Amino acid sequence: MSAERASADGPAEATVLEFEGVELSFDHKVLDGVNFRMGAGETRVILGAAGSGKSVLLKVAIGLVPVDSGRVALLGEDITGLEEKDLFAVRANVGVLFQEGGLFDSLTVGDNVAYPLENQQARGLAPAEEVLRRVTEALRFVELEHTLEQYPAELSGGMRRRVGIARAVVTEPPLVLYDSPTAGLDPITANLIMALIAKERDTKGAASLIVTHRYQDGQLMADFRYNSEQGELVRASGDPSKEPRTIFMVMRDGQIVFEGDKTALEKSADPYVRKFVRR
Amino acid sequence: MGGAYGSLYDSIGIHEYGGLETARGEISPVNEFLRAWISEWQDFWFLAGRAFANIFRAPHYWDDVALQMEAIGVGSLPIVMLTGFFSGFVITMQMSRALNTYGAVGQVGPIVMITLVRELGPVLTALLVAGRNASGIASELGSMKVSEQIDAMRALGTDPIQKLVTPRLIATCVMLPQLTVVADFLGMVGGFAISYFSLRLTPSQYWTPAYQILELNDFVQGLLKPFIFAMVVALVGCFYGLKTSGGTQGVGRATTQAVVVASVWIFVLTAFITRIFVNL
């Protein structure tokens, strides 16, 4: 099955993530010839049914799961076949939000958010005296600075997800991966989480790869921008030259069956793709 | 290649064994079983190898080692003391009855000492620690696995084996021999209690021959066994914890497997070690 591709190729720009013919099988084929290239500052929204390979793709992107064949380049470095210890240095420049937040239960919220900075510190990348300031700043970004001394178990699901975002962005990485950031949340909290993701994209210019099964999440990323002056999301101008690109990818049985912008997605005639579009 | 998603390699970045196909590329049920078994062994030894190698490799998480020593050592102390005391107590009662037949009740001290130092002390303590800590380790690491904390750790640039497995291995290897010494001593005290109050032996009748019977061989196997059992308990607990898949049900399964496998290996290994030492 060849992917339907529409308006995905923009002007030449730095590539933050590239998949080339990536194949992966467990008991069955999980990724089947996945190809895409993601530019700096770009937003990619991956839609697909449960078990279509969305979350595995995210894990493959940072080398958590080794591929059977093909090539994955992360921030310009080919990570295919890299040793785990060599991957740590590449991953230090990528933020990841796991499905349930992935927070360490045994550490306080402050220590959780400080964790990537301390790892960077060990590599001589972040000065020790800056850690607390940056942790507080990251928690303020998700409006949870009062939870510094609390443990993840004391927080609600939405708050844990927000702390997870703070931990993912505290090092100000050029690429942030979000695995089902709104799964299992009520609509109000889900919108709050997506607003924070848009805020991170628009204030820091980070590229965002978002795995979700909610079309509204992608819609929000494509149609809204965070306005720092007003301190809220505003409707995007609609001028592609002024706005960061939002590309949608739809996955089915390990293959990308659609790749393109929101307009192309909404016009798609593929019955599977249409299932994910709410008009 | 690849294997089941959620297997150990997924946790720590290793590859599974892929082989044993027939000439026509089919996999027979026997080969499938062998493949799974060999794959599990390979994963276990890979984990063990990396856990040991990390002892000599930076970074060292000494805070975690101290925390685990507290959890495994201090936490297990009351139950080890209690079990040790009553083991000595019952061995003395059982042995005194048999020895009485030959009019040799005075030899109960050496018999209890040999039984405890060579066999029961190390095995009982290891079984208790396996029940308490191999399960604890497997359930803690299993919960971390299913809630993606292990993935998060790897994504944030930390080797889970370095951070989670090696500290538990060091802590168990340091604490289990010490717990065994405590259990041996309390066992002797338990034996003395029954000898003194029931068998009417004097303290010197009990303690002096008991100490005299001990040889270097007894000390070596009495301390070597818990050291090896500690490796089994820690590594089996970590192995099944990191291999967990299938949500909370998987955590329960991993915990049970860890205790069962660690306990069986303790019995198998004690038989092998005893076989070696008994001929020395």
Image (cartoon, coloured by chain):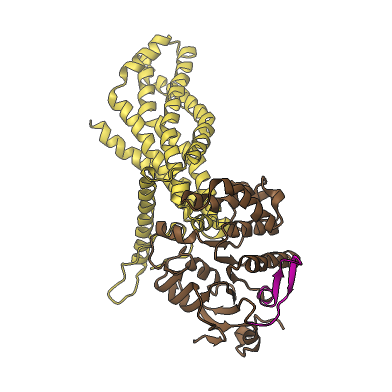
Q: Colour of chain B?
A: yellow
Could you tell me residue B259's position as x and y percent? 47, 45
Q: Vertical placement of A275 versus B88: above or below?
A: below
Q: Residue at x 61, y 65 (%)?
A: A204
Apparent side of residue B195 relative to residue A204 in the rendered image (left or right): left
Specify whether residue A237 is painted magenta.
yes
Q: Nearer the viewer, residue B88 or A269?
A: A269
Say which chain is brown: A
Which residue is drawn at the image coordinates 42% and 69% (left, top)? A67
Residue B30, percent across and down? 34, 65
**Vertical relation: B219 (above or below) B257:** above
Residue furthest to the bottom in view is A269
Q: Which residue is nearer to you in this view: B272 or B160?
A: B160
Does residue A54 appear in this view?
yes
Question: Where does the image place residue A229, in percent across and percent down from the top left?
Answer: 74, 66
- Residue A147 against residue B210 in the figure, above or below: below
Q: Is residue B186 left or right of residue A243?
A: left
Identify the magenta region: A217-240
* Residue A183 is at least partly visible in this image: no
Quarter containing the C terminus of chain A: bottom right
